[in-house]
Image: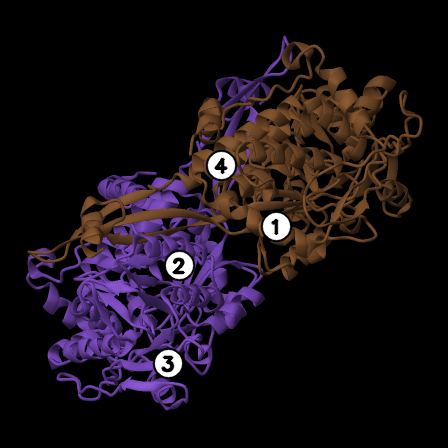
Chain colours: A purple, B brown
Amino acid sequence: MTHQLFEQHRQTLEDAVEAIRSRRHFSPYPEVPSGRIYGETAKDDGARAFENRLNAPFEIDQPGEVARVGRERSPYGIDLGITYPRPDLDTLLKAVEQARLDWRTADVETRAGIALEILHRLNQRSFEIASAVMHTTGQGFMMAFQAGGPHAQDRGLEAVAYAYEAMTHCAREATWEKQVSKSETITLNKTFRIVPRGIASLVACSTFPCWNGYPGLFASFVTGNAVVVKPHPGAILPLAITVEVMRDVLRESGFDPNVVTLAADAADEPLTKPLVTRPEVRLIDYTGGSEFGAWIEQHASQAVTFTEKAGVNSIVIDSVPDLKALSANLAFTLCLYSGQMCTTTQNIFIPRSGIDVNGERKSFDEVAEAIVKGVDWMLSDVKRANELLGAIQNDRTAARLDQAAAEDGVEVLRAGDPIAHEQFEDARTRSPLLLKTDAARTDRYMREMFGPIAYLVATDSTQQSIDLMTRCARECGSITAGLYSNDPGVIETAQWATADAGVPLSCNLLGSIYVNQSAAFSDFHVSGLNPSGNATLCDLAYVANRFATVQSRIPAAQAPGNSKTEEAVAAQG
Amino acid sequence: MTHQLFEQHRQTLEDAVEAIRSRRHFSPYPEVPSGRIYGETAKDDGARAFENRLNAPFEIDQPGEVARVGRERSPYGIDLGITYPRPDLDTLLKAVEQARLDWRTADVETRAGIALEILHRLNQRSFEIASAVMHTTGQGFMMAFQAGGPHAQDRGLEAVAYAYEAMTHCAREATWEKQVSKSETITLNKTFRIVPRGIASLVACSTFPCWNGYPGLFASFVTGNAVVVKPHPGAILPLAITVEVMRDVLRESGFDPNVVTLAADAADEPLTKPLVTRPEVRLIDYTGGSEFGAWIEQHASQAVTFTEKAGVNSIVIDSVPDLKALSANLAFTLCLYSGQMCTTTQNIFIPRSGIDVNGERKSFDEVAEAIVKGVDWMLSDVKRANELLGAIQNDRTAARLDQAAAEDGVEVLRAGDPIAHEQFEDARTRSPLLLKTDAARTDRYMREMFGPIAYLVATDSTQQSIDLMTRCARECGSITAGLYSNDPGVIETAQWATADAGVPLSCNLLGSIYVNQSAAFSDFHVSGLNPSGNATLCDLAYVANRFATVQSRIPAAQAPGNSKTEEAVAAQG
């Protein structure tokens, strides 16, 4: 096989491998949606491409279409009107099983080259994907561009880099020589084959279909598995475009495009359970709620499953140099995408005796007030508010705010009211609901309350705050943890406490860096050590179990291609 | 921490890392039980050390001893009379939980150095361990020396090498710099911590306690987990000695020896189920029967489980250059340790129309007769027979031969009678039972018949033979596969067929190399792709999920140890 695509993108892969080892900043896909980078017409082209998708069938020439599904409604209030093929699983999987045969025997460079070309083309489609992500997830445009475009592509490339490292860790062929006696030396030619598990299924979520979906998608794909992409019925379009691009590149490269297929479904006729329990499905990547994740882990025992479920994330405030800088930073975290990130902070632990601010004592209420003011300021400009908050993906999230505010044991510090959207009048919006409660009320804050809901929890001490933060991680799962402290001893304590609880810690973040940001190639996202998920985006464990290395061995003198064998065979012929 | 042990054994580790990448022959622990290598008194010292163990309590100063257990009886007919502490799990696990705290924070070099020193000391104890393995498993002395000594140590070192690769794959610290605007650059100091899962449990088997046990034991240990070793009640001694050595080195290195403990039990009061379902146990390595393995996979859902279960292994005979060389090779495979290896061939598929032998047609019956003669010749010298066959570990294995011979649908080609042991008159022995059957009788051969039982199966063609071999692998699990063919096309077909079925293939092995041998650092043992197990000894997937990498990040200006922080803190003090 030629390795033209591999050679074309080789530098990108090598840089990515260097980055996952050094953990330094790396982002080959520019995050700024600028015409100078993406081309002056890129923005308009992307917008037009998205508009052309609306109110039309999304065509994918894959087998087994038995119906059309699709009722995506933008959280900004627009019905997308796009339909997708709903497949008959028997027909689809039979075709996938056939398609994967050539893909599994393609060599590592061929598959990696194709994956890199796909990422490159997805990057060129970032504006179109941004609109698709915005109008399915409810993210603001800038965030949709970054999280659905370059940052998701980064995460996909990261998975390719890890998989490449794992697949090339050992030699493909070896000559094994062992002297077994004074007169006898055994020489074996060994061939080590990368054997993929079979068919993989990506079960994606409605809030970050690309960012959370690409790692598993590309990890399974590049290791030689076929992938059936099962988007959330509320966020099909971003992954349908992704599947389209993948199929295009596969076809152009001489492979059966059914190596990657779409299994779209409707909320009232879901496909996930029948799909993930099929015996042919040997790998599952799941992002979504804890309950359904647990169902998959329990019932899809024929498959190796990688999950990212929910998290209850905490920040501990012990002491800060500057209350305004703190509240500005926290406000951004709480507002971004209306708290619908799996990395958003839910619990903010503050000693009831207050904290030290640059040598001065500030009471719990003063700190709480600063945070409320920070959020209010952040949303005081409607353009900024709209862009930052985006829209609420799901009705149930909006309803949860009202429930949380009405419960006993909490005091509403800031109401989570809607904020009108300048551009989309039917947008479903909510601003952060801030609640005060006491450390004793674990029934309130020690559970997942997804959405723009944060509890400011009064504790006896910073030590109790750290204990509660790690208890949240152990019992409910946590994906991020934060700490503000001037005390090196507190920092040291928190570092191992959070590490043991399997949650990465961000200390003293002020300015333009936030606890809910996770950078591909540098930050490990989810540890697998607490209930928030069983896998890490990305590490070696995330890729190495998607294939096995299976050897064959033959005496060197008889190996195919060895002239002695050929002579022997010829002599026998 | 000093890295004295690491530096002392560094070359061994580096050579091991090179070997797992190149897959070339490597074996740092000499497999020949020679006085010139191990010291002239080593053999006698080892024998005396073993004898001193007999009829006495095995002392381990670990907490929670509530009773004494141990009724090991040598398959050679001797009661060992050794007792071991039976622990109270609550007390034991509390102590282990405490012991692991310092172990988990020790750096990679410290842990690797200690693991390498342990392997070095185990190697020095190879003669003692050989006697312990011989008189628990029933292996002949030479095999017990190799499989319980150097080859097991090789497998342990291989696991250490893989774990070292995985733990050092990424930087421990990084400076992450990102320009977020024209005027602002964010600089974070990041620390990446290797966080072990917690407590691991090794559930070992009665036939290869060391060879199958060391990989998981050392993989969990070196990645910072504590390990509770749960030997099979019939083969405690080899692992008790191992635990003793590990505790000695831990203690000498300043660690709490309870990082490694022994959980011995009795067959009538087993500890395995209560142990592996404890919430503290987060990793399980299991070798043993399929049924109990499946029970663990289902019930110990709190843990990540690595299993090696049973295999039904096949050889396909298509054509050979020399029938005698073939039968000599097969005879050795079938006789070695009375077929009690997980790699021993059970099914030998031969076309009913016969095979080509160097241009001449040989009928099925002629091939079968040659194999029977080969086994008879192999056992014609009683010393060789005793050493090769060893003894039958378990009564049930002996009974299985009688059952298999009496079933309908099979013809007994060679009875599996006992062979008197020259040295141990009460030894439980059986020689290979060879049965002829037809491809249609899948009820006979397509199930695990553990022990010296082999089916010679008449097939329609070599293609059917290959199909049945891979069907065995898919349905029953296979750990080894063999092929004899002069036809490059047949070899090619079999290579991908077996790879897809997740079973390594040995082609045309003649002379002193056998299908049931698996060489550490070169051969991947078990693929995880068929029911014979879910993991490979060893690959990256085998080690990478025993820990997670959890980062903490802090603005560079505030990182502990940074002079600016110290100044800032001092200024605030």
Spot occupied by residue A31 in the image (x, y as percentages of width and height):
17, 58
Question: At label 1, which amino acid type do we have?
Answer: Ala
Of pointers 1 and 4, the one earlier in the residue sequence: 1
Badge 4 and badge 3 in a common chain: no
Q: CA distance from mark 2 to mark 1?
A: 25 Å
Task: Indicate left or right for A47 with B269 as reference.
Answer: left
B192 w.r.t. B108: above or below: below
How busy is the neighbourhood of tag 2: few (under 14 within 10 Å), some, or many (20 plus)?
many
Please report, as a chain letter, where disc 1 is located: B
Spot occupied by residue A244 in the image (x, y as percentages of width and height):
30, 63
Q: Which mark is residue A372?
A: none
Q: Nearer the viewer, mark 1 or mark 4?
A: 1
Q: Which one is nearer the viewer's eye here, B512 or B546?
A: B546
Badge 2 and badge 4 in a common chain: no
Question: At label 4, which amino acid type do we have?
Answer: Arg
Residue B418 can be seen, yes or no: yes
The residue identified by callout 2 is: A503
Spot occupied by residue B327 in the image (x, y as percentages of width and height):
75, 24
Q: At 10% across and 58% down in the image, what residue appears? A: B181
Q: Nearer the viewer, mark 2 or mark 1?
A: 1
